[in-house]
Image: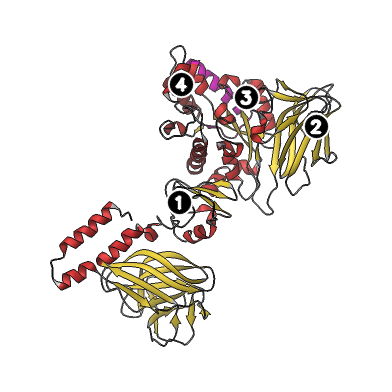
Amino acid sequence: MAYSGRRFCEITAKARRADGSVDAIVETLGSSIDIGRPDLVNTGTNTPANYSVVMQTPAAADGYITGVDVGASGAGAASIHVIQYNGDLTVNVIRTHQITLANGVSEIPLSIPIAAGQYPAISGGAYKFQNSVNPEGIPAWIKAAALSNGATVASSTQHRYEVAFTIKTGLVADVEVAKNGGAQNTGMNLLADADPNGVVDATAIFASAAAHPNPYVPPGSFALTAMPKSGDGFWGPGKLFVGGRRFFVPARPSLFNLYDGFRAKMAEHIANNDVLCLIADSIGHWALASNGPAHWFNRVTQFANLGVADDEPGMTALRPSSTYLPAFYGVTTSGTVSTGTRGPLGESIILADGASLAFTGAYEQVDVHYTQDAGQGSLAFAFNGGAAYKTVNAAGALALDKYSGPSLTGQAASGNYTLTAVGGPVEITGLIRLGIKAAGSRPRLRTLRASHGSYTFASFNAARLASAIAQCGYAGGKIVPVFALGINDSFGTPPATISTNITSIIDTLEAALAPRIFVMPPTRPSSSWDGNYTGGRTYDAALGAIRQTYRSRNVLSVPIDGFDYINSGAYQEGLHFNDAGHDGNALRFIEYVAERG
């Protein structure tokens, strides 16, 4: 068993101070005292809400309340207090600790300091008592309300309360507290029994821990069906998955939870149906997450819409002419397909007559952005191989990024969707898949990915930006860009040119009335990529130009370049994120926006 060094030193020092006398040895070793009825049950009558019981046996010496046993017939919340009795049937509350009750007789470990002469107490409701039965005559001060400083109590031996406290002093207490790491008082060990492999559901354990103001989430992956209190107070390195979707908590204790905090900073965009649009290179595109849901931008989308809808970020990289294939995000093709030159990436997918896109999922809305032009065919939307539930005619005068919707699927379950070109080719520049929205849930945050491997700032020219701006207006809102570019610029573009290209992009977006612009500077690659720099270019020179331009334009910069991706094991091969890198990048984006956005 591992004890902290500080606690071990305290224990050693106390042991050495014992001078050999019986009194000194007793004082140093300490004692363990149980206060309350020894044999508890969870039957009888429920105490009323906020009912308070102060046991009339004080702590004999300075020590700790190391545990409380409580009999209850169901879940509930209660407060454990350290009380000072003032001698006139009034009390003061010295300390308070929250606990969660459960059906049965719960043995709840604690580490609450208590001084000699102070008393343990419980407030809350739903713990049991035996009405007018108290054969042991155990006395208590009681109050039919919560305790506060100066509260008046009444002395009674009428009832037997199904509550018992353990108070330990001296070395006995120190060893107990060291063994638990001060766990209950600090919240550090409240989740020790949760499965860190994400196999056994940990919802009940997290719900119990939520009674503490700052429960620590240790390393590991934890599976839950619901997150208590939207994650209020939880913190630590552990990874939470609620219904299989990633739920983020801050790395350090915070006054805010990240879910409500992030959505609060996105509130204006959610309300206005704006679209958070990732404009990026290969890292933003896909590299090198092991699958679509593990990508950092998908993680952000999942988290923001947890309990709302299981949306996919809008897709623009649909072309089949790359080592990347749309299948990475669950989209496959059949028939003859080719690559066009339109859309936010200057690369679209053209379905020949009879060719189709296919994907599986539970979606309430499926739509596309397409090119209307003479000689184009129609696009037929079908579910599970049935007749087309919607058909869009793409023939007509030239119009770019036409929106097919809103097209409600009418489906409430997962199934197979096919989008088939009929009577001629159809050029598709974007795909929208919105999950089935939970009844009564909050509105969704809409997202779209416009990212491509090897792209630089210059790659997003006026035509491509115009396409992205148009697609982000599909629900009546505006584009809210997130730039994650620059690493490809650093390899060969002069810093002054980088600044000019950034300025051009920001000018275009501001002219389109983008309400806000987020930027994520490039992260430093490992030395194995040094051979990619040409003409004396360096990462630092490029970063300086990028940072200076961002600062001068007053955009919100999320400082992911302030993290050592190289030595933290967040890169797959020194440049592109692995799954841990994507997960950490999502956390850094969410936390920075939630707290400073």
Distance, label 4 to label 2, CA atoms, is 43 Å
**Residue 408 at what x, y percent from top left?**
77, 43
Q: Which residue is mark 1?
A: 217
Q: Quadrant of the N terminus?
A: bottom left
* Cα distance in 3D space between marks 2 and 1: 48 Å
Label 2 crowd bin: few (<14), some (14–19), many (20+), radius 10 Å: many
- Residue 277: x and y in percent read 61, 33
Q: Which residues are magenta?
A: 492-519
Identify residue for label 3: 323
The tag earlier along the polypeptide, 3 or 2, is 3
Which amino acid, by three-letter code, is at mark 4?
Trp
Give the residue number, with chain letter if any, for mark 4: 529
Q: Quadrant of residue 567?
A: top left
Relative placement, left or right, of 505 versus 533 is: right
Give the image location of residue 457, x and y in percent.
Answer: 56, 22
Q: Which amino acid lies under the numbered mark 1 shown in the image of this protein?
A: Val
* Label 4 secondary element: helix
**Circle 2 sits on which residue?**
420
Asked if marks 4 and 2 touch (Cβ < 8 Å), the reply is no
Q: Earlier in the sequence, mark 3 or mark 4?
A: 3
Q: Residue 129: percent from the left, percent from the top?
A: 48, 80
